[in-house]
Image (tube, rainbow, N blue to C red):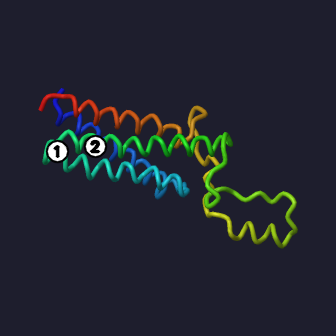
Amino acid sequence: MTRRTYTLLALAGSAGLLLGALYFQFVQGLLPCQLCYWQRYGHFGALVIGGIALALPNRILLALGALSALSSSVIGIFHSGVERQWWEGLKSCSAPSLEGLSPEEAMEAIMNAPMVPCDQIPWEMFGLSMANYNVVASAVIAALFVMAMRAPR
């Protein structure tokens, strides 16, 4: 395959992930958490950089596209661990612990909690969350950018 074909496949993958995220958000009503938004940023970057690389074929641009998609995969790994309670997430996006709090303190913690906590899994398929699927899909997209770098024009 040619460089252009691999680049188009990578762009289609990033666009597909973003469209899927928007579908779940606006059609299915699953509001994203802070880490969900962060995972999208890598694909926005991959679309912009990859689009430029189509117009101006350049291996450096393709490498940047790969890094952009890979950043989404890395954030997805972190998010997956937070969801599975393997490690603590960001204070700004985890559900508060109400243990040992007075009723007033508990109410304040609830009122100041993020709208959508990152440590909850709102959707699963075959035991895997959206963050889990994003890890793999983003890595594949990054690999497509790398294959575009190595492919003939």
Q: Nearer the viewer, residue 123 or 110?
A: 110
Mark 2 falls on what kind of element?
helix
In the image, residue 102 above or below residue 122: below
* Residue 12 as seen in the image, left or right of residue 21: left
Q: Which residue is mark 2?
A: 11
Name the residue: 40% across, 54% down: 41
Between label 2 and label 1, give the one nearer the viewer.
1
In what quadrant of the picture does the C terminus appear? top left
Residue at 23% x, 39% y is 8
Q: Amino acid at mark 1?
A: Leu
Residue type, numbered disc 2 = Leu
In percent of width and height, residue 117 lies at 63, 56
Horizontal arrangement in the rendering, residue 84 relative to residue 46 (left or right): right
Element at badge 1?
A: helix
Residue 3 coordinates in the image, percent (x, y) = 18, 33
Could you tell me residue 122's position as x and y percent?
Answer: 61, 48
Pointer 2 with pointer 1, Cβ within 8 A: yes
Identify the mark nearer the N-term, 2 or 1.
Answer: 2
The residue sitting at 13% across, 47% down in the picture is 56
Q: Residues within 10 Å of mark 2 (few under 14, many from 20)?
A: many
Q: Mark 1 sits on what residue?
A: 54
* Residue 30 circle label: none
Task: In this rendered view, identify the residue nearer to me: 91 or 1.
Answer: 91
> Label 1: few (<14), some or many (≥20) within 10 Å?
some
Looking at the image, the residue that sits furthest to the top is 1
**In screen coordinates, is 145 left or right of 92?**
left
Q: Is residue 76 above or below residue 36?
A: above
Whether residue 107 sits left or right of residue 11 in the image: it is right
Label 2 and label 1: CA atoms lie apart by 10 Å
